[in-house]
Image: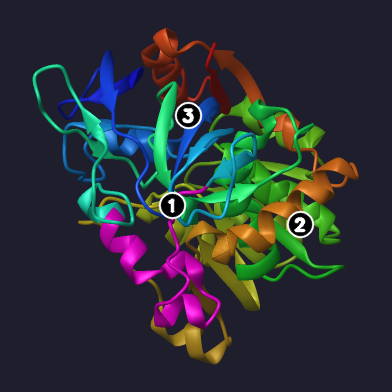
Amino acid sequence: MKTRGAVLTGVGGPLEIVELELDPPGPGELLVRVHATGLCHSDLSVIDGSRIRPLPMVLGHEAAGEVVEAGPNAEFEAGDHVVLSFVPACGACRRCASGRQALCEPGAAANRDGTLLSGQRRWTLPDGTRPHHHLGVSGFAEYTVISGRSATRVPKDLPFDVAALFGCAVLTGAGAAFYSAEVRPGEKVAVFGLGGVGLAAVLAAVTAGATQVVAVDVVEHKRKLALTLGATHEAAGGPDVVAQVRDLTGGGADKVIDTTGVAAVLEQAYAATAVGGTTVTVGLPHPDRTVSLPALNLVAEERTLKGSYLGSCVPRRDVPRFVDLYRAGRLPVDGLLSGRLGLDEINEGFAKLASGEAVRQVVVMR
């Protein structure tokens, strides 16, 4: 079938909206009509070259849509509403078997190579070129083919623009707070970086019972938004942010979550963590970046530094859990939405994301 999609052909962009030929789904795969896809810094990092991916590529990794056709042996049927997540967990490797599906080995290999979990590509450009898939999703297209292992069924009354956020921002941010940081009632929490992922972490920290949540960002309107979502304090990012956070929390936060992907900010987040506390890093820095941390207090103060990918979540377990929290009014994810765009407006949307003007925009397919 023919469909339109946003293709990155070279580092720096822009994305080109082109007509693509899309092959039918193979065994265990789904043809999905995409209704909404979020604009995320992980997409932006591919565009600007911070994350090296094979090109050309149909971008977009945080999406929701409706199953149109299910390939042989797929676990879904036409009409199912699904959230698409960016790790196509095979369910059988040793990481999946131990409950750490975010670290699925075949899924990571497929994502690195720009293929589906099967190792196949389903796109063709008019000149015969076969574009790559972005993290098994490629949601910036009117239709896409995915592995069924990338999909989680959701209620049909959940709005698609909200549902899309559960595929990355909510899993990554809320999961980092609930699972990686294990925020407990009464704890003090700081979140560095207030994009969609960071704000989802703020929401989850509040839901988990943190008595103090410090929202940190260089952009003032993002800090103000965090306060409306339940943060108790704000701190402006910059050279003195560690002193600000330590002063606000009386010596450091018990749990600090860094979502920025900036090595220097991770060092600040670690320095703002209390004795005996945990620092969780979520953002993906450039592969060449390193961090420098004081080795002594890691031991003498019993500090913990943890990485968190996909919020350490299992999508088929946690998307329904988080959706239930949203529907109960305890995880107001719709507060993250800062704009809805058409597919043809996608480059303008990424410019707003890069400048800090927007938090979480969603491309809505019409």
> Which disc number belongs to residue 321?
2
Which of 321/219 is in front? 321
Q: Rounded to the nearest whole Å, what is the CA distance between mark 3 and mark 1?
A: 31 Å
Foreground mark, 1 or 2? 1
Q: Which mark sits nearer the N-terminus, 2 or 3? A: 3
In the rendering, at what x and y percent does residue 145 appear? 39, 38
> Which disc number belongs to residue 72?
1
Q: Which mark sits nearer the N-terminus, 1 or 2? A: 1
Instruction: Name the residue rendered at 81%, 32% in the picture.
Output: 228
Instruction: Name the residue rendered at 35%, 18% in the picture.
Output: 3
In the rendering, at what x and y percent does residue 200 appear? 67, 45
Relative to residue 60, is residue 94 depicted above or below? below
Left or right position of 99 against 199: left
What is the span of residues highlighted in magenta in the rendered image? 85-110
Residue 257, picture quadrant: bottom right
Relative to residue 265, is residue 3 depicted above or below? above
Residue occupying the far bottom of the picture: 300
- As helix, strand or loop, the secondary structure at mark 2 comes to helix
In the rendering, at what x and y percent does residue 226 appear? 72, 37
Relative to residue 263, is residue 124 depicted above or below? above
Instruction: Name the residue rendered at 70%, 71% in the picture.
Output: 182
Q: What is the total number of numbered labels drawn onto the structure image?
A: 3
In the rendering, at what x and y percent does residue 113 appear? 21, 52
Q: Which mark sits nearer the N-terminus, 3 or 1? A: 3
Give yes or no for residue 64 being in the magenta stretch: no
